[in-house]
Structure formats: structure tokens, C-alpha cells
Image (cartoon, rainbow, N blue to C red):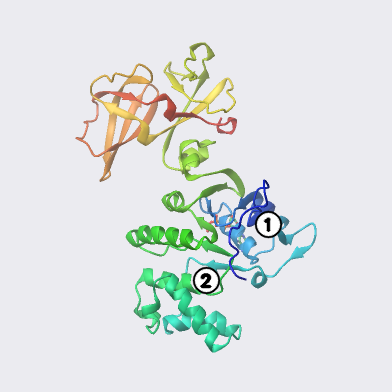
Amino acid sequence: MPASPPGPPASGSPPTPHIEVEGLELYYGSVPAVRGVNFNVMPGEQLTLLGPSGCGKTTTLRAVAGLEQPTAGEIRIDGVPVFSAARKINIPAEKRGLSMVFQSYAIWSHMTVFDNVAYGLRVRKAGAAEITEKVDRALDMVQMREFSGRRASQLSGGQQQRVALARAFVFQPSVLLFDEPLSNLDAKLRADMRIELRDLQHRLGITSLYVTHDLEEALAMSDRIVVLRDGLVEQTGTPDEIYSLPRSAFVADFIGSANLIRGRHRADLAVDDLIALETSDGHVIYGMAYGRPVGSELVVSVRTVHLRISLERPAATRNVWPARVEKTVFQGDFSQVHIGWGDQRLVARCAAMEPIAAGRDVYVTVEPRRVVLLGAAAL
Ligand code: ATP
């Protein structure tokens, strides 16, 4: 199926999502892998399913591909159901117009680049001229045409991954599904390929659903992210929303490291649209509710990168506390500083600096807007 261009929506009406997943459940016997997942992918969008191992990412992706049969729910592509438990619809994988790129990209090392990409077309009995045209075009997309005649075993890891991509593009799918496609590459190449894949996806405007447990990859590559936990959606949003406004302790901690601080709401101390909470050892911390309901017991999240440490008392008047350094862990470009703060320990991530000796008295401070109220589920 040719890629359907995003196309203008009918006047006033929102565009139809390219992929819609509604109430998806999938049990392996009695093991619940997916327990009620909902999300949409808009035309041309790159949506990432992110979460720790076992949260149901791959199962969800495979259900969209038609490689697993869900227990309940509905999956629509371009508004047309390809799976519906209630309506007993289950369109086979090869008729869904999707292509999948796997983690183990498993290209055949004894074959040439051309033959690897042509393989699927030959299986489908395409003619020689059509094969040449489509393979050349797919190889052009990933800038691998000059390697057409080379054996796959003589390619680098990144080049092999590009061949795997070309193999997916050759069918001109309307949607690409990626299952941790970069996880077999070394760290440097993975970082390069991230940018390359993102550019390619933008250039082609192809809708993609991407699975990874790698936070940086998800933040760098996605238009939106769905964070999954134990087979359920924990939060959906743009990378910035997920990073800056985590809804739960789980998201705050999984998406970059965060300090979670609990306390009692002190409505009487609220000033300038800020909320105030008091910890059990009497620290008052000002933060932002960002429209979330404010109960009597609160949990706020403060990213480790947003805590500042100084030897002199800073000029700020709010959220400044004397504290003591417990230890500093050198990690190259930055150091992790563990700070005793009353009964609690806070962790700050500081850009490389002169090491501060354990036992040193310092000031720790954080801007109130960086103190984010979490939802009630965090309690
Ligand atoms: P990973 O990042 O480790 O691949 P994931 O988030 O993709 O994890 P899934 O592979 O979707 O997770 O698995 C979700 C749950 O379903 C896990 O508890 C897993 O053990 C279970 N599971 C997956 N495949 C099967 C299977 N074929 N039979 C039984 N249980 C399975």
C-alpha cells in the first residue's frame, strides 16, 4: 500500500488518526501483558512506546502489526478496523500495510545488499523491473545504493541496520513499526542512527510507532511518547511534557532521575500562585501545581539537574536551605552530589566542578517552577 500523505483534513474536522488503539488487552494464557491500552498516532507522527522491561511495549506493537491476537479491544488503521474483538475482525498481518523493523535486524550475511532488500519482493513474485526500481529507491532512501553489490557480512553494524530499514521501506508501507531497532548497536553509533532515523522519518513524513526502553532515544526521536507500566498507560505527552511535568512518581523517576519529596500542604503559606508543602522535618518547599488538584498530603518531584549547590548563600529567598554534602560521585561530564537535607537525602546532578568534600556545609536551592506537584497516584 502506498504511503498515504497526511493530506488536509476536511474543513474544521480533526484529521483521522493513522493508527488508533482502543482498550487493547492481551493475555498470554493467564499472564496479562497488556491490560487496557489506548493511544492514537497521527499521520506522519512518530509515537514511541516507552517503559521498563516487561511493561507490554513489544506485545502492543506486535498486536498492531497483526503478529499477536489481542484478547480485547480494537485497532484501526486509517479509521478502518484491522482488529476488533467485539466485531470479530482480525485482518492478517500482510494485509495491514505496515512494515516492521526488528531489534535483531537479521539480514542475511551471505547475500548482497540488493538481494537482502529484494528478498520480500521476490517471495511475492514481483517482476524483475519492478524489483530493481523498488530496491534502488529503498536503498537511495538510506544512502546505501553504492553498496548494492556488497555482501552484507562486509558491512558495518550501522550499514546493516540501514539495509534492514531499506528492507522495510521497499514495500512502501503506510506505517513503520520499530521494535528497539538500535539496541544492538554500540552507544556512539546508536546516537548517530537516532538522528539519522529521525531525519529520515521527517523527510518521508511516514507514520511510525517505535518501541524502546531507552529514555534518551525516546526523548530525542519522538513527537509524542506513551509511557507504559505493567500493561497500562502511565502518561502520554510530548517529550517536553513527559520530562517537565511527570504525572506520577513512576514517570518522574523513570524519565531522568528525580528527587521525590513528600509533605503536608500548607495552604496558609501559599504565595504568588505557588503551593507550599512542609516536610516531616519542617522544611517548607514552594512548587507549582500546574493545574493538578492539590490535596492535603502532597508529593513533588525535583529533577536532580535542577537542584543547585553553592558554598555561599544564594540571593533567592524561597527554596534555599543549608545542607551538608554526604558524598560526590564523579561521572565524567557531571558529578552526582548526595546531600543530607534534614531526615532526607537529596541527589543533585552538577556539571563538572571542583569536587566538594564530604561533610562540607553548603546551600541547596531550587526554583519553585522546577518543583512539580505529582498526581494523587504518587502518594
Ligand atoms: P522488553 O523491553 O523486555 O522487550 P516489553 O515491555 O516489550 O519488554 P513484552 O515483551 O510486551 O514487554 O512483555 C509483556 C509481558 O508479557 C511480560 O510479563 C512478558 O513476560 C509476557 N510475555 C511476553 N511474551 C510472552 C509469551 N509469548 N508468553 C507468555 N508471556 C509473555
- Quadrant where the C terminus lies? top right
How many marks do you count on the picture?
A: 2
Residue 173 higher or lower than 86, as above or below: below
Q: Is mark 2 within 8 Å of ligand 1?
A: no
Residue 109 showing in the rendered view:
no
Q: Which residue is mark 2?
A: 168
Residue 114 higher or lower than 309, as above or below: below
The residue most toward the right is 87
Q: Secondary structure at mark 2?
A: helix
- Whichever of labels 1 and 2 marks the residue nearer the N terminus, that label is 1
The residue most toward the left is 354
Q: Is residue 321 left or right of residue 255?
A: left
Residue 242 showing in the rendered view:
yes
Density class for disc 1 (Cα within 10 Å; few <14, some 14-19, many ≥20) is some
Residue sitting at x 28%, y 44%: 331
Density class for disc 2 (Cα within 10 Å; few <14, some 14-19, many ≥20) is many
The residue most toward the front is 11
Q: Quadrant of ligand 1?
A: bottom right
Residue 233 higher or lower than 289, as above or below: below
Give residue 179's mark: none
Dot 2 amino acid type: Ala
**Of residues 211 and 336, the one drawn nearer to the viewer in this rendering:** 211
**Of residues 209 and 8, the one drawn nearer to the viewer in this rendering:** 8
